């Protein structure tokens, strides 16, 4: 029923105005799925390879499409993703591009769901999914690789951990974003927005902490539930491997000082979530921090794990982190992303399904988070490419997809 009849690939715009790959998958019975690849700015060294869009499309047309059309059923995600791997033949999708691979993988899943007449989350996760929802981590202030002349820490996140529903959580994050706008205004600090829609003021990290703490407290008082503060430090971007120091402007920290600094921040701000507190090769530092504060906060590996089960297994073996960020385009297929979530879950780690800084209106990750019962999703706060996912979560919760 879901035998693939055609796969079309095209170049579309992402939220930064860069080209990205969109895939359409059509089945013999008329099922249709469309999906687009996101793109990172603070990419991890060990991610699958994103090729220039034109090259990725040409290579996928040559190698992947013939292996899919008339050969593979869109409803069988493992077969689709095995065909993508088979057509590429490398460990990192450097032949067809992880951007082509992930677009086709997600479009096939949607085509399979379309034939079945089921919502995507149910096709991917089964009939018993859809009752529990991830806590949305909302980027409200940021800098790093996502905005020049702003904070050194890449993302300050609102974490509405006490919200009674996903809808209330999503609106709380938007209220925190708005409140921060007011607080910046009161201080006379002008602020544009970074790539993910977070405020990008030219303030130091300590000031950003003050403002975010104030805004989350104010909104928590209004809505009547707990809103914590989280961070994506994206520490690889701060690390200078030659001098072996982290550089926050003029302030330098050795790897040991970086771990101390992160542990101090967790306690000072009662942080609910910290992503990439140390650089992507420092499993030891990550493990040290996990030992020190892993009982009271979520310590998540993004560049550390890159959605890769081998790197995740190393983290599990060494006690590095208690959560994994899951970005399908870091690894290239939905099957690989689900494998990472399942390995994490079996070992007591939390999965945090995530957008990229360069996004489209594609909402697949909302369904992936619900399908895998992930406790968190990180997908921004405002801006159409971010609200596409947040609004889809609200629809899923209402059985309106
Ligand atoms: C979403 C992130 O940014 P990017 O997509 O630039 O890697 C991140 O680092 O978690
Ligand atoms: Mg990150």
Image (cartoon, rainbow, N blue to C red):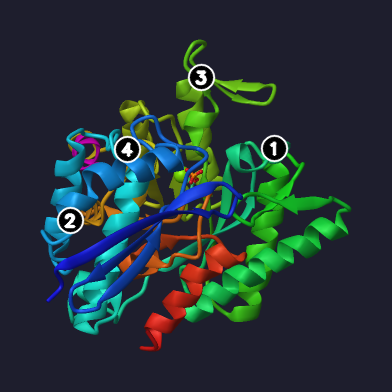
Looking at the rendered image, the disc whose residue lies closer to the viewer, 1 or 2, is 2
User: How far is mark 2 from mark 4, CA to CA?
Assistant: 21 Å
Foreground disc of the pair 1, 3:
1
Q: Real-space Cα distance between discs 4 and 3?
A: 29 Å
- Choose between 284 and 239: the one closer to the eye: 239
In the rendered image, the vertical position of residue 134 relative to residue 165, given as above or below: above
As helix, strand or loop, the secondary structure at mark 2 comes to helix
Check the image and name the residue furthest to the top. 242
Q: Is residue 280 above or below residue 228?
A: above
| Left or right: residue 39 compared with residue 345 | right
Crowd class of label 2 (few under 14; some 14 to 19; many from 20; radius 10 Å): many
The magenta stretch spans residue 234: no
Residue 308 drawn at (x, y percent): 25, 41
Contact between marks 4 and 3 (CB within 8 A): the answer is no
Instruction: Determine if the C-beta at disc 1 is less than 8 A from ligand 1.
Output: no
Q: Secondary structure at mark 1?
A: loop
Majority secondary structure in the magenta region: helix
Residue 68 numbered tag? 2
Q: Position of residue 123 (x, y in %)?
A: 21, 74
The answer, for residue 351, to whether it is visible in the render is no
Mark with earlier residue (1, 3): 1
Q: Between marks 4 and 1, how big is the CA–CA gap?
A: 26 Å
Residue of label 1: 148
Which numbered disc flags the more N-terminal residue, 1 or 2?
2
Q: Quadrant of residue 172?
A: bottom right
Q: Which residues are magenta?
A: 307-314
Tell me, for residue 48, which label it has, or none.
Answer: 4
């Amino acid at each position: 029923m879901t035998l693939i009849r055609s796969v079309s690939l095209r170049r579309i715009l992402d939220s930064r105005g860069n080209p990205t790959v969109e895939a359409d998958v059509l089945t013999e019975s008329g099922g249709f799925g469309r999906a687009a690849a996101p793109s990172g700015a603070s990419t991890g060294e060990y991610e699958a390879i994103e090729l220039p869009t034109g090259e990725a499309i040409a290579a996928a047309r040559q190698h992947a499409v013939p292996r899919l059309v008339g050969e593979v059923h869109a409803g069988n995600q493992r077969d689709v993703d095995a065909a993508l791997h088979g057509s590429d033949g490398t460990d990192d999708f450097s032949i067809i591009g992880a951007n082509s691979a992930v677009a086709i993988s997600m479009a096939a899943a949607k085509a399979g769901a379309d034939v079945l007449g089921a919502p995507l989350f149910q096709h991917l996760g089964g009939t018993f999914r859809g009752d529990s929802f991830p806590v949305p981590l909302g980027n409200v202030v940021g800098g790093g690789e996502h905005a020049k002349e702003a904070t050194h820490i890449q993302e300050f996140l609102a974490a509405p951990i006490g919200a009674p529903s996903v809808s209330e959580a999503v609106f709380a994050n938007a209220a925190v974003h708005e409140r921060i706008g007011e607080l910046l205004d009161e201080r006379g600090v002008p602020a544009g927005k970074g790539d993910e829609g977070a405020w990008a003021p030219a303030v130091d990290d300590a000031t950003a902490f003050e403002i975010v703490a104030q805004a989350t407290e104010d909104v928590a008082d209004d809505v009547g539930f707990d809103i914590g503060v989280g961070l994506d430090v994206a520490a690889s971007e701060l690390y200078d491997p030659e001098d072996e120091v982290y550089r926050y402007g003029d302030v330098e920290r050795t790897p040991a000082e970086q771990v101390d600094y992160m542990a101090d921040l967790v306690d000072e701000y009662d942080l609910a979530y910290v992503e990439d507190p140390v650089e992507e090769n420092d499993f030891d530092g990550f493990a040290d921090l996990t030992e020190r504060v892993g009982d009271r906060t979520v310590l998540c590996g993004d560049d550390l794990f890159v959605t890769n089960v081998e790197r995740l297994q190393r983290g599990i073996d060494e006690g590095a982190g208690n959560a994994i960020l899951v970005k399908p385009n870091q690894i290239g297929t939905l099957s690989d992303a689900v494998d990472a979530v399942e390995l994490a879950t079996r070992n007591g780690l939390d999965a945090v399904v995530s957008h990229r800084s360069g996004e489209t209106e594609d909402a697949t990750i909302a369904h992936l988070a619900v399908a895998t019962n992930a406790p968190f999703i990180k997908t921004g706060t405002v801006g159409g490419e971010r609200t596409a996912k947040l609004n889809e979560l609200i629809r899923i919760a209402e059985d309106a997809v």
